[in-house]
Amino acid sequence: MPVLEWSEALSLDLPQMDDTHREFVDLLAAVDAAGDATLLPAWQTLIEHTEVHFGQEDRWMRETRFASGNCHSVQHQVVLNVMREGLKRAEAGDLELLRMMSSELAQWFPQHAQSMDAGLALHLRSVGHDPRTGAVARPEALPAAEISGCGSAACTPHGESAQDSRQSAAA
């Protein structure tokens, strides 16, 4: 039985993002189900998918004025680096580490998807971003300055404090 299964709770009403997330969940389940002989190739496939997955979201953030160093992108980099390090250690014989990492990813992913990715999906819909072409249908809805936060509702545009953001929202 997979550690994480796709559910509507993970759906963000952005088809390309949802499809990519569903594939991540399926690949993570394949890692979970893999025997010792197939664990490394399954993990490598998961890494390859995750590189494309995170690269796609990072590109969408750049196309819609998220700052290049925002915490959402940084989290992508950290997770990928940890996954790559896990692969190196597993290649040296520590397969149990990948099994633990798979379990940790299964706990991390829903939180990431339901906070950072949900905020990004909302932002992308609000500016009319086409994830396939990068076109923005409502450029007037783009933020005036780059968003330096994570992309969730709690994040604020670059240079704006959380209190300023709350005051602007209340006005």
Image (cartoon, grey):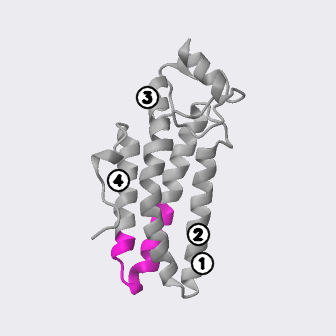
Query: Counting other residues with Cα less than 10 Å from the Cα at mark 3, is it few (<14), some (14-19), or many (20 or more)?
Result: some
Q: CA distance from mark 2 to mark 1?
A: 6 Å
Q: Which residues are magenta?
A: 30-49
Q: Amino acid at mark 1?
A: Lys
What's the residue type where badge 2 is placed?
Arg
Residue wearing tag 4? 22
Q: Nearer the viewer, residue 144 or 108?
A: 108
Kindly report the secondary structure that dominates the magenta region of the rendered protein. helix
- The residue carrying pointer 2 sits among few (fewer than 14), some (14 to 19) or many (20 or more) residues within 10 Å by Cα, namely some
Say which mark, if any, is on residue 84. 2
Residue 122 magenta-highlighted: no
The verdict on residue 34 being magenta is yes
Tell whether label 4 touches label 1 (CB within 8 Å). no
Q: Are marks 2 and 1 in contact (CB under 8 Å)?
A: yes
Residue drawn at (40%, 58%) of the image: 24
Counting from the top left corner in percent of width and height, residue 153 is at 51, 33
Which part of the image, by quadrant, shows the C terminus?
top right
Q: Is residue 76 left or right of residue 7?
A: right
